[in-house]
Image (cartoon, rainbow, N blue to C red):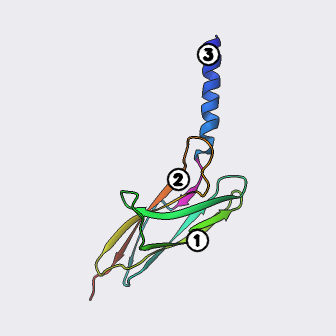
Amino acid sequence: MPAMRHLGLAVLALALATAPAAGVGLGPLAKSGITDGPRKAFYLTLINPYPTATAFRAYAVGERDETAQPRVTIFPGETTLGGNANRRLLVIADDLAAGETYAFRVCAERAEPSEGLIHARVCSHLAARRLPAA
């Protein structure tokens, strides 16, 4: 019986430790668009699931790696959201060449690392395509 009690306590501790894993929300998780100019803008929604105000940061990385994307600007890149609040982010992909499809990810996470082992982050996959020159 003592082994069952320890197992139950271990399961409870694990459940409590993983509860903050929903540390940020970002949507939609995939979006694409077409433009006839050198820029394409997207709106994403950043969500704070915590009951208190929390600081978040958003940044752009490569489609399949962690390479920073200097062609992408995010407004605001850092923000503090009230408890259970959300905010729209403006994402602008720049310097699109005629006929180019530019794919990247925008990721969001808590600005200050949380205590514990879990680093909660969510990424949205975006693709901007510029029409070929006429």
The residue at the point 30 percent across, 75 percent down is: 100
Marks 3 and 2 sit apart, C-alpha to C-alpha, by 34 Å
Q: Amino acid at mark 3?
A: Met
User: Where residue 66 appears, x then y in whole percent?
Assistant: 40, 57
Count how many numbered circles sit on residues in the image: 3
Residue 114 horizontal side relative to residue 43, left or right: right
Residue 1 horizontal side relative to residue 132, left or right: right
The residue pinned by badge 3 equals: 4
The residue pinned by badge 2 equals: 121
Q: Is residue 25 magenta?
A: yes
Q: Amino acid at mark 1?
A: Pro
The residue at the point 64 percent across, 30 percent down is: 13
Q: Amino acid at mark 2?
A: Arg
Which of pointers 3 and 1 indicates the residue nearer the eye?
Answer: 1
Within 10 Å of disc 3 (Cα), the crowding (few <14, some 14-19, many 20+) is few
The answer to whether marks 3 and 1 mark residues whose Cβ atoms lie closer than 8 Å is no
- In terms of image quadrants, where is residue 95? bottom left
Which callout, 3 or 2, points at the residue further toward the start of the chain?
3
The residue pinned by badge 1 equals: 76
User: Where residue 125 appears, x then y in whole percent?
Assistant: 42, 61
- The kind of secondary structure element at disc 3 is helix
Within 10 Å of disc 2 (Cα), the crowding (few <14, some 14-19, many 20+) is some
Which callout, 3 or 1, points at the residue further toward the start of the chain?
3
Q: Is residue 40 above or below residue 133?
A: above
What is the span of residues highlighted in magenta in the rendered image?
A: 22-27
- The kind of secondary structure element at disc 2 is strand
Residue 96 horizontal side relative to residue 57, left or right: left
Q: Nearer the viewer, residue 110 or 35?
A: 110
